[in-house]
Amino acid sequence: MMKIDFSGLAASAPLCGNTDELNNEISTGQKFELPIADDFDGFQREAVQMVKPAKGTTTLAFIFKEGVMVAADSRASMGGYISSQSVKKIIEINPYMLGTMAGGAADCQFWHRNLGIKCRLHELANKRRISVTGASKLLANILYSYRGMGLSVGTMIAGWDETGPGLYYVDSEGGRLKGTRFSVGSGSPYAYGVLDSGYRFDMSVEEGAELARRAIYHATFRDGASGGVASVYHVGPNGWKKLSGDDVGELHYMYYPVEPASVEQEMTEVSGS
Amino acid sequence: MECVFGLVGKDFAIVVADSSAVHSILVHKTNEDKIMLLDSHKLMGASGETGDRAQFTEYIQKNVALYQFRNGIPLTTAATANFTRGELATALRKNPYMVNIILAGYDKEGPSLYFVDYIASLHKLDKAAFGYGSYFALSMMDRHYHRDMTVEEAVNLVDKVIMEIRSRLVVAPPNFVIKIVDKDGAREYAWRESIKDAPVIAS
């Protein structure tokens, strides 16, 4: 742990019998307030990290007129190391329900697969498809029973059932929220900004897909833990369909094409004499 | 930070809760209903960890319904409060539920309000509050409360408290839900919204 050496700032001015208040302050030597922390250099980083949502990823989903739009990046990071740029973060639970992955990859993949099994068993036992409400409740109850044991799952269950489009946010603390717009992951504040400002309920499928893609792109631009490919899926009355999977690097140059620099003054060869 | 408060009036009890679902610095939702209807004449407003809040209040709700099915008569408010406290106390030294509860009900004893802490303390009170909002709510209620308030007077006081929370609390929740229970049953009274979330529209 580094400690800054302040001996050089010790009071060098001689003590004088001065009753002037102002001078007294100056003569006791320079000092300034320091944060009360052992690791002076690291505490600020810790403070920023504490506020940043964990789970290095960006996923989002929103309900609109034509159904549910679901989008995610595809980067997996272990601290500062990018372990993969091609992770499938949108998990196909069944042909009309999708789940997104944020947090521990193994946890998300396993429990979504498990949820898919339970949904199929429900169909066989009850001769009808499970609702999005029911599926999200099954998952939330399972995760709640493991609370405190270190599961890390921040997922959204999106689907279309008899009551129309449904979207739920479920996490490993046992929280379950019904809503119309969610974004999960370390890049989620960035995605929320673009998503909230561009959202309209009566968008078309193309406009919705473009909004989702743009929100993921902007999050990957600013968040180091998000990147790779922006995948966009649409869930309609007949089930889900993958709409696009674009590399965010290519999206960058598509949204912000490089202008050829205008030449102000051309250097010409001086005709030799 | 979550704010839940409540008070007892002439023949009714009123419970108010904020409606933000928050995760660190992100607000996921601003219209989350944190006051659960336990049965026809009981309300349970809860604040605390998201998972615990939803799951524990549902557990109490289902057990209240089970008692009614088994015995043919509903639980009294006092019995419900003691049951809730008992469940929190049993789990406290093993797997504690981080939920603070304000239980309001109307039975043959009239309206009553119970304050149940996350460490399973139980108090029957005329007015109670939880969360950072309690710093403002408690003193305001102490000042303006009197026995046998009418619904109008109580809602006026509630609105004053909400305005105070909105203006003085640094991360004040924008929206609140007000629920009331009287001889006619427990129901939602009003929302006080300053930010409108897009409603979930079923196609």
Image (tube, rainbow, N blue to C red):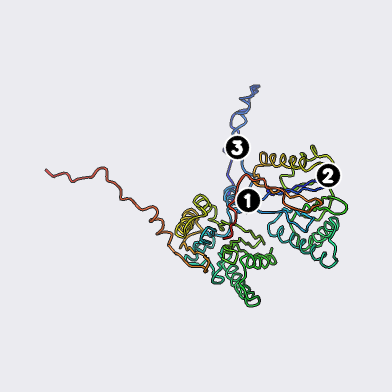
Image mark 2: chain: B
Secondary structure category for the residue under label 3: loop
From the top left corner, tell me how far across and down residue B28 is, in percent: 60, 54
The numbered mark at residue A32 is 3
Left or right side of B71 for B135: left
Assign the C terminus of chain A to one quadrant of the image: top left
Residue labelled with disc 2: B10
Q: Identify the residue at image location x=54%, y=71%.
A: A95
Q: Are marks 1 and 3 on the same chain?
A: no
Q: Nearer the viewer, mark 2 or mark 1?
A: 2
Image mark 1: chain: B
From the top left corner, tell me how far across and down residue A86 is, in percent: 47, 67
Secondary structure category for the residue under label 2: loop
Quarter of the rendering containing residue B118: bottom right
Amino acid type of the residue that numbered disc 3 sits on in the rendered structure: Phe
From the top left corner, tell me how far across and down residue A97 is, in percent: 56, 68
Residue labelled with disc 1: B30
Q: Nearer the viewer, mark 2 or mark 3?
A: 2
- Residue A46 in view here: no
Image mark 3: chain: A
Amino acid type of the residue that numbered disc 2 sits on in the rendered structure: Lys
Amino acid type of the residue that numbered disc 1 sits on in the rendered structure: Thr
Q: Identify which residue, B16 or B156, lies in the foreground.
A: B156
Question: Number of callouts in the render?
Answer: 3
Kindly report the distance in space between the C-alpha atoms of the residues bearing marks 2 and 3.
59 Å
- Residue A64 in view here: yes
